[in-house]
Image (cartoon, grey):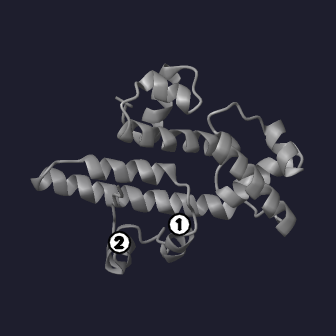
Amino acid sequence: PIRSIDIEITPAYYDKYLKEKYKAEYIDPHDAFSNIALTNHFPEMIQLLRQIRDYKGEGIAGRLFYESKVTEALSLIMAYNDQQKKTPPVKISSADLRALENAAAYINDHFNCDISVDQLSHIACMGRTKLKLAFKEIYGTSITEYIQQRRLSHAETLLTLTDFTIEQIAAAVGYSNSGRFASMFRKSTGLFPA
């Protein structure tokens, strides 16, 4: 099953409302919107969109909730854009790019095992520091966060499509402690696995 949550922010909103409200600080968010389209890892936005999906309020409470979420989404996008500008790009050769793809493929196939940076360094034929910097540049997240995202993504599928217990799912995705799994799942999705 595929579900979609969409926020449409019109130019009239940021051209009129934001310019009037934040005259001295206004920056055209067009570049920020363009940059966000290039990322595939934005857990804060995923959590916000899930909150929108699950909200059931109506009337003035509903309107206030949705308006606040649009403002929050714009804030997240602008903050993400500012962070990207502060991080100097790492130059990555095509050979290093292929090596990173091999490391990511290894993670995708073995995310439920203990994976060390040393293992990935060996697979990618890179030093630890270079691997960490290049991985973050290409995938927009640290190696640890990428592994956690893969684990929790698979856990969502198992929770949705199977009758496994939370303990079984935690073990299947690589967590030896179901309490730690539940904590990480809640941090990522805003919901408890149950």
Give the amino acid type for the residue marked by disc 1 in the picture. Ile
Q: From the viewer's perspective, is residue 86 above or below residue 65? A: below
Earlier-in-chain disc, 1 versus 2: 2
Q: Quadrant of the N terminus?
A: bottom left
The residue pinned by badge 2 equals 9
Residue found at x 38% / y 55%: 72
Label 1 element class: helix
Provide residue 98's location: percent of width, then percent of height.
80, 62
Left or right of 23 in this view: 27: right
Label 2 element class: loop
The residue pinned by badge 1 equals 36
Q: From the viewer's perspective, is residue 124 above or below residue 27? A: above
Provide residue 155's location: percent of width, then percent of height.
47, 37
Question: Is residue 181 in sight in this rendering?
Answer: no
Give the amino acid type for the residue marked by disc 2 in the picture. Ile
Residue found at x 34% / y 64%: 6
> Distance from label 1 to label 2 (Cα)?
14 Å
Dividing the picture into quadrants, the one containing residue 81 is bottom right
Left or right of 167 in this view: 52: left
Choose between 156 and 187: the one closer to the eye.
156
Provide residue 194's location: percent of width, then percent of height.
34, 29
